[in-house]
Image: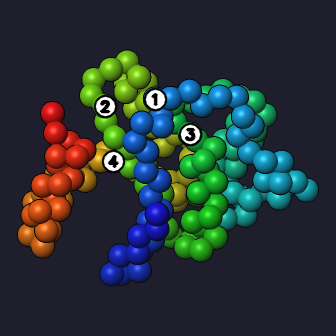
Amino acid sequence: MLILDQSGNAYAVESKFSEPFRSHGNSEPFKSSYFKDCKRLWTKHGLPRCQQLAERLHCGEKLFRYLDAPQLLKHAIGLKRAYSTGELVLLWFDPGHSGEQAAFLKEIEMFKELVDAELGFTAITHQTVFASLKTETNADPDYVNYLEQRYFAV
């Protein structure tokens, strides 16, 4: 999802619910076209650290179990092609305290450290966004109640 604010700032939002906590299989992280003819796609768009990470993942280095880093890196290229100052946001559902959740958080932090600051990568939970929505004065209370019952009821 792409969000443009009133100032024209672009935010590419990758939303995950339960996907990080399922098996990802062993598929190739990138098609060979991302590296054909030494394109250096990420570097071309001002993201040399993303380029290094993509190359490591493409060569088979297993850095992430829960975070789909290749998908985020692909979104980074799409975002920077259209909006050079755009930011990448990972919106994820926090299932609560578990070993998997803790490992996922560590992977998010590792990804943030490995990519370029210019990517503006941030991660936020669905719960945090919903808590903010609940305080929004213009939000439809019936819809907020529906969301709360459907996704956040205990």
- Residue 143: x percent and y percent? 17, 62
- Which numbered marker is on residue 124? 4
* Foreground label between 3 and 2: 2
Say which amino acid is labelled 1.
Phe
* Foreground label between 2 and 4: 2
Q: For mark 3, what is the residue?
A: 68
- Which numbered marker is on residue 21? 1
Q: For mark 2, what is the residue?
A: 95
Assign a secondary structure to mark 1: helix
- Residue 126: x percent and y percent? 29, 47
How far is the residue under mark 3 from the one under mark 4?
Answer: 15 Å
- Residue 115: x percent and y percent? 56, 47
* Residue positioned 59% across, 57% down in the render: 75
Residue contact at pointers 2 and 1, CB within 8 angstroms: yes
Give the mark, 2 or 1, whose residue is nearer the N terminus: 1
- In the image, residue 135 sits, relative to residue 102, either above or below, namely below
- In the image, residue 33 sits, relative to residue 94, either above or below, namely below
Say which amino acid is labelled 4.
Ile
Q: Is any part of residue 36 visible from this angle?
A: yes
Give the mark, 1 or 3, whose residue is nearer the N terminus: 1
Give the mark, 2 or 4, whose residue is nearer the N terminus: 2
How far is the residue under mark 2 from the one under mark 1?
Answer: 9 Å
Give the mark, 3 or 4, whose residue is nearer the N terminus: 3
